[in-house]
Image: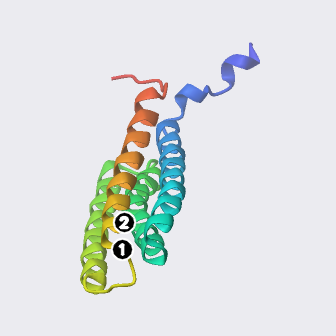
C-alpha cells in the first residue's frame, strides 16, 4: 500500500480558507494602522493617533472577531456556528453603540482620523478576507 495516499492533503482542510482569511485580514489591518498612524500623527498629532487607534480597533477588530468565531466553530454543527456568529454580531453591535455613545463628545481623538481609519480598516480587512477565501484551493463535493 502506498503510504503517500493515506496522508491527508492540504486541500482537504476546510479550515484553510478561514485561516488564510484571518492572516490576510490581520496583515491588512496592521498595514492600514501603521500607515494611518504615520499620516494622521503627522497631520493632527496625538488626537490623530488616538483616532487611528480607536478606529483600527473598531473597524478591524470587529471584522476579525467574526472570522475568529467562524474558525473556532468550524468543526461544530451549523446551528452552533450560526448561534455563535449571530450572538457575536449582536454583542459587537451593542458594544459599538456603547463605545460610540461614550466617546461621542470627547475631544481627545480626531473624529476624521477615526472615521477614515474605520472605513479603511473595514475595506482592507474584508477585501483581504474575500481574496483569501476565493483564492484558496479546497476540495468541494457538492
Name the quadrant of the N terminus: top right
Above or below: residue 125 compared with residue 86? above
> Badge 2 local density, few (<14 within 10 Å), some, or many (20+)?
many
Read off the residue under disc 2: 113
Above or below: residue 90 compared with residue 127? below
Q: Residue at x 50, y 67 (%)?
A: 41
**Real-space Cα separation, disc 1 to disc 2, in angstroms:** 5 Å
* Of 102 and 91, the residue lying toward us: 102
Q: As drawn, which residue projects farthest toward the front?
A: 43
Q: Residue at x 37, y 52 (%)?
A: 120
Q: Secondary structure at mark 2?
A: helix
Q: Which colour scheme appears in the figure? A: rainbow
* Of 58 and 1, the residue lying toward us: 58
* Horizontal arrangement in the rendering, residue 6 relative to residue 75 (left or right): right
Answer yes or no: do the residues labelled 1 and 2 have beta carbons within 8 Å? yes
* Horizontal arrangement in the rendering, residue 113 relative to residue 138 (left or right): left
Point out residue 19 in the picture as x, y percentages from the top left corner: 53, 44
Q: State the mark number for residue 80.
A: none
Point out residue 95 in the picture as x, y percentages from the top left corner: 31, 76
Q: Residue at x 39, y 22 (%)?
A: 141
Q: Based on the displayed image, in which of its 4 quarters is residue 94 positioned?
A: bottom left
Point out residue 104 in the picture as x, y percentages from the top left corner: 25, 82
Point out residue 119 in the picture as x, y percentages from the top left corner: 32, 55
Read off the residue under disc 1: 110
Name the quadrant of the C terminus: top left
Q: Secondary structure at mark 1?
A: loop
Above or below: residue 32 compared with residue 48? above
Q: Based on the displayed image, in which of its 4 quarters is residue 115 positioned?
A: bottom left
Amino acid at each position: 500500500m502506498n503510504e503517500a495516499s493515506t496522508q491527508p492533503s492540504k486541500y482537504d482542510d476546510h479550515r484553510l480558507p478561514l485561516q488564510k482569511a484571518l492572516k490576510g485580514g490581520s496583515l491588512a489591518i496592521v498595514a492600514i494602522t501603521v500607515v494611518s498612524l504615520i499620516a494622521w500623527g503627522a497631520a493632527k498629532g496625538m488626537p490623530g493617533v488616538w483616532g487611528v487607534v480607536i478606529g483600527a480597533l473598531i473597524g478591524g477588530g470587529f471584522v476579525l472577531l467574526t472570522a475568529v468565531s467562524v474558525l473556532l466553530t468550524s468543526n461544530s454543527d451549523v446551528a452552533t456556528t450560526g448561534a455563535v456568529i449571530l450572538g457575536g454580531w449582536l454583542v459587537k453591535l451593542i458594544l459599538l453603540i456603547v463605545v460610540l455613545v461614550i466617546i461621542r463628545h470627547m475631544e481627545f481623538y480626531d473624529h476624521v482620523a477615526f472615521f477614515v481609519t474605520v472605513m479603511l480598516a473595514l475595506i482592507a480587512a474584508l477585501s483581504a478576507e474575500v481574496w483569501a477565501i476565493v483564492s484558496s484551493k479546497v476540495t468541494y463535493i457538492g
